[in-house]
Image (cartoon, rainbow, N blue to C red):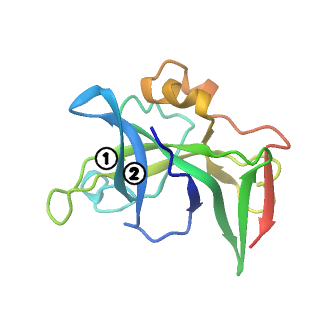
């Protein structure tokens, strides 16, 4: 499957669309890359939309997805930063998707699963998206490795943080 790894902006507006990778709900043998809306479906959360879900205490048994990314962006005050892997490689952000509203759009929704920030990101924010590497893609989508093993804070020297 071709990867559309682009920067991920965690301050993007609710409802912004991004490609996600998931198991096709109509044929679970098939992986698909589809467009999805950023944020949770308010129908499932008392009318409130959320963009993130904490990894701690969550089982996340189904509706898993991935978002390919080349870097993620964060904003601190008026300054913006980009966070890239030290290796320069692309990665995936672990996520969960929800069915579409069925009224104004047929696009599903997605949220990013977060972990405690690693040492390079911690001076700027407390949490960031759970990073998965290409070798972990099927472990996440197929639930063959526990969340506790996959959804971890990356070790020191994983990221390079630069002001934009």
Q: Residue at x 75, y 48 (%)?
A: 88
Count of marks overlaid on the render? 2
The alpha-carbon separation of the residues under discs 2 and 1 comes to 6 Å
In this view of the protein, can residue 63 be seen by the observer? no
Vertical side of 77 occupied by 96: above or below: above
Q: Callout 1: few (<14), some (14-19), or many (20+) C-alpha neighbours within 10 Å? A: many
Residue under label 2, please give it.
110
Task: State the residue at coordinates (37%, 61%).
Answer: 49
Contact? badges 2 and 1 (CB < 8 Å): yes
Depth order, front residue of 89/8? 89
Q: Is residue 156 left or right of residue 108?
A: right
Give the x, y percent position of residue 53: 49, 47
Can you give x and y, in whole percent of width and height, for residue 122 in the image?
A: 78, 54
- Indicate the quadrant containing the N terminus: top left, top right, bottom left or bottom right: top left
Residue placed farthest to the left in the image? 103
Q: Which residue is mark 1?
A: 98
Instruction: Give residue 159's position: percent from left, percent from top.
Output: 78, 49
Of the 4 image quadrants, the one containing the C terminus is: bottom right
Relative placement, left or right, of 107 versus 90 is left
């Amino acid at each position: 499957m071709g990867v559309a790894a682009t920067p991920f902006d965690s301050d993007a507006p609710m409802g912004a669309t991004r490609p996600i990778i998931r198991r096709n709900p109509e044929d679970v043998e098939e992986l698909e890359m589809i467009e999805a809306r950023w944020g949770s479906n308010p129908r499932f959360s008392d009318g409130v939309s959320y963009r993130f879900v904490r990894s701690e205490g969550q089982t996340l048994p189904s509706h898993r997805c991935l978002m390919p990314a080349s870097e993620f962006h964060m904003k601190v005050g008026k300054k913006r930063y980009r966070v890239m892997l030290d290796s320069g490689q692309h990665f995936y952000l672990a996520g969960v998707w929800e069915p579409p509203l069925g009224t104004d759009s047929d696009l599903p929704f997605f949220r990013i699963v977060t972990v405690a920030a690693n040492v390079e990101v911690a001076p700027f924010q407390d949490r960031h998206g759970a990073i998965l590497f290409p070798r972990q893609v099927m472990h996440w989508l197929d639930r063959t490795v526990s969340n506790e093993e996959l959804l971890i804070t990356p070790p020191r020297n994983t990221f390079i943080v630069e002001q934009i």
